[in-house]
Amino acid sequence: MYVKILKKGAVFLLALLLFLESGAHASAADVPLLTPSAIVIEASTGQVIFEKNATERRSPASITKIMTLLIAFEQLEEGKVNLEDEIIISAYAKSMGGSQVYLEEGEVQTLDTLLKCIAVASGNDASVAVAEYIAGSEDVFVEMMNEKAAELGMTDTHFEDCCGLTDSDNHYTTARDVAIMSRELTTKYPDVFRYTQIWMEDITHVTARGSSTFTLSSTNKLLKQYEWATGLKTGSTDKAKYCISATASRDGIDLIAVIMGAPDPQTRFQEAATPVSYTQLTLPTTPYV
């Protein structure tokens, strides 16, 4: 089957929308990317539209937090926690390096605020604080993450922390598995978009030294660069390079594009929504995620 897209420079994710009705699938040869591993799926069905080395195990960096958010939203749905719950920040949570929102030991924040810190600013300290609140310790929370991954059929995933800060070789996933957990989170708990669509928002730190304002700024530049972006999560470390699980919605169609191992931040965003031209592509059907 052949699909002609005549408009030059059509945006990648939007061009892919035209393939959905036929269950079409574009290969890595059709869509050249600098990124070593990528996948695009339609969220409601899980239909794979494009993939490149999608089952290659890679370090996920902070897109690990998609699973952290998924566990948190499950706990909310089950009534085990509430958004208004007040969480006391531990010394261990405060000690997290990397991206953080500078929580202090003994500081109190609501779960709602900490979810914003995770989804918007990718706070490692906030992720650990939520993990400790839900499970009692990060280690037990990570067990919950791995159990959920197994339940979802994420056969090439293993977590060792809740935020992706580790460089351990035993902390890995794949573009395909990231798409699976991103789909589970966004289709089952669409309230997550209330957090992932925030561009900037202030939170208040209240500590022994007094009260101060801290501005959360989204790590997902697609929210400003791409008209139909709705989320979801970025990540980067020296080992993982630059990653993103990007969600977009237009005309009732929701897409998830996962980029792993991009060489630089801009490539990560461009290749989640990059200009390409398609002419007479052969597009076979593919199994769903």
Image (spheres, grey):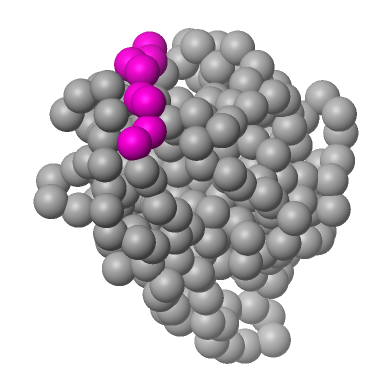
Foreground residue among 70 and 62:
62
**Residue 120 to residue 249: above or below:** below
Indicate yes or no whether the magenta region holds residue 281. Answer: yes
Q: Residue at x 64, y 36 (%)?
A: 37
Can you name the residue that lies furthest to the front here?
280
Can you name the residue that lies furthest to the left here?
251
Decide whether the magenta segment is chiefly helix, strand or loop.
Answer: loop
**Residue 238 to residue 280: above or below:** below
Q: Quadrant of residue 2?
A: top left
248 left or right, relative to 137 = left
Q: How many marks?
A: 0
Q: Quadrant of the N terminus?
A: top left
Indicate the position of residue 269 as horizontal and vertical percent values. 54, 61
Q: Is residue 242 visible?
A: yes
47 left or right, relative to 275 = left
Indicate the position of residue 5 as horizontal and vertical percent values. 27, 48
Q: Quadrant of residue 63?
A: top right
Foreground residue among 58 and 284:
284
Magenta span of residues: 280-288
Q: Residue at x 44, y 78 (%)?
A: 200
Q: Quadrant of residue 182?
A: top left
Q: Quadrant of the C terminus?
A: top left
Q: Residue at x 52, y 75 (%)?
A: 217
Foreground residue among 264 and 121:
264
